[in-house]
Amino acid sequence: MSEFKLFSVKKFYFIEYFYILLKSVEAHSTEENIFNEFLILKQKRRLGLSRYKKLTQDTPSSPKSMVKYKYTFKQVLAETEEYLLIRNEVSKIVLTDLGKKAIQEYEQNGYIKFNELLFSRMEKKHGAFRYLLNVCYQANPEKSGLLIFPIYSPYRLDIKRASIKTSADLRNYFRLLKERLESDIDKYLGKKQVLDKKNEELLHKLEKANFLPTDRNMPFQQKEYTAILKRTRDFWLKYFLQDLYHYEFSLSSFDIWAYRGKQIGLLQITEFYPDPNFSGRIVYPLSILNKNVQSKNFYELHKYSNGEKLYLHKPSWENEDNREEFLRTLHKEYLDIRRYTRSYFVNLPNVREKVCYALKIPEYLFDLFLGRAYHEKNEIQISLEGDKLPEETNAMYLKRTPVMVDGKYRNIIAIDLA
């Protein structure tokens, strides 16, 4: 078992929660008043337990909602105290000097610096990010730590929902899924895996749970279709995470730490990488572990007791080589997406996904570089527009953050040579 304490992570994703808790403690000292302030800020910033931000500000009304919000508050409160940002005295809760410094960091230098400060507290307590990076690099050293988590519905395997009626139909889907997973493992991880035994294990589990009739000609319960697909997805995700990548903890702990790492810029995790031949989630590092790195494109964020250091990849726009590489990659990936969408204006978040992967930079750095490229004279001419924004749809969660340039959200892009 690993020395790291990933199992003890509290169940919330957004690092921003620490800031609103600290602001609540700054304003009040009793837990009840802190909770009320926390709730106001939580709603205002559209934070939930999901890894996606909400698009609407919901007002808690039911006792059930309040129980859920109170649970989140308790989780954040406990973890904030673990990191010595607050102190729970006999009759009041107060900020420590470190907590005051964290608020100052956010308000003077922005959320990126705040996140990096929180990173140091988390890493000192849990060592989770070092463990995560080691899992990535050891699992797929040939492709710089890329991890894949394939998710293929019947539709993605060209199976029509109406054609799935019997146990045999479901088993055919499971067989095609197994073959596709074997292919992906070979293609993206460079490993040969025969998954026949794992597939049989899945079938046995579904039969035991009365989801899959043992008689191939028997119809299955149509109302359980979604539950069957979820169990299948979770089964294979667990296989990839624990059997292939040797991650020693739960899928939920992996998700929480990985999405926190994304906010800091340590790694990228996304379910939306625009590859027509792949469906699912990918994870890859944006940082390295080393004892000494000379490149100015890497920024030392943390030093461990054995002398090893964690470096963020943070190239500077002021470096001419970095500017040229970004512009060249931006144009190349734009043309690649334009080729299969056959449209002059293309989806900007898709371009961002491909550029971030090619350059191994975090999303916030892409946004910064794009803003600079948009305004500065260079060899390409960039047009940015705001298509239908998430707030104008019926969606409940903001699953992909639009790029902000000049204080406006942009989500489509076109590029010409100047």
Image (cartoon, rainbow, N blue to C red):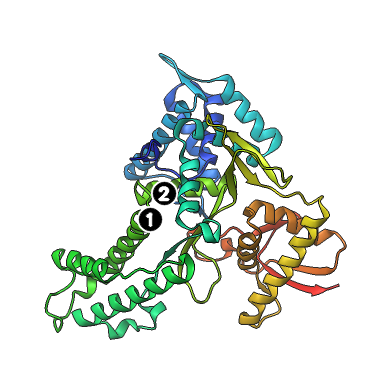
- Can the viewer see residue 39 in this picture? yes
Mark 2 secondary-structure assignment:
helix
Residue 38 higher or lower than 13, as above or below: above
- Which label belongs to residue 254? 2
Report the quarter where the C terminus lies. bottom right
Task: Name the amino acid type tagged 1.
Answer: Leu
The residue that disc 1 covers is 241
Q: Position of residue 298 (x, y in %)?
A: 68, 45
Observer-nearest residue: 242 or 109?
242
Q: Is residue 380 left or right of residue 285?
A: right
Front: mark 2 or 1: 1
Of all residues shown, which one is farthest toward the top? 90
Report the quarter where the N terminus lies. top left
Q: Spatial distance from mark 2 to mark 1, Cα to Cα?
A: 9 Å
Q: Residues within 10 Å of mark 1 (few under 14, many from 20)?
A: many
Kindly identify the residue that appears in the image at 77 percent across and 69 percent down.
Answer: 383
Observer-nearest residue: 292 or 92?
292
Q: Is residue 154 left or right of residue 349?
A: left
Mark 1 secondary-structure assignment:
helix
Q: Is residue 305 left or right of residue 105?
A: left
Kindly identify the residue that appears in the image at 51 percent across and 50 percent down.
Answer: 57
Q: Position of residue 81 (x, y in %)?
A: 46, 26
Observer-nearest residue: 417 or 180?
180
- Can the viewer see residue 398 in this picture? no
Going from the N terminus, do you reach mark 2 or mark 1 first? 1
Whether residues under marks 2 and 1 lie with C-beta atoms below 8 angstroms apart, the answer is yes
Task: Name the amino acid type tagged 2.
Answer: Phe
Kindly identify the residue that appears in the image at 41 percent across and 77 percent down.
Answer: 156
Q: Residues within 10 Å of mark 2 (few under 14, many from 20)?
A: some
Kindly identify the residue that appears in the image at 30 percent across and 61 percent down.
Answer: 235
Q: Position of residue 180 (x, y in %)?
A: 38, 75
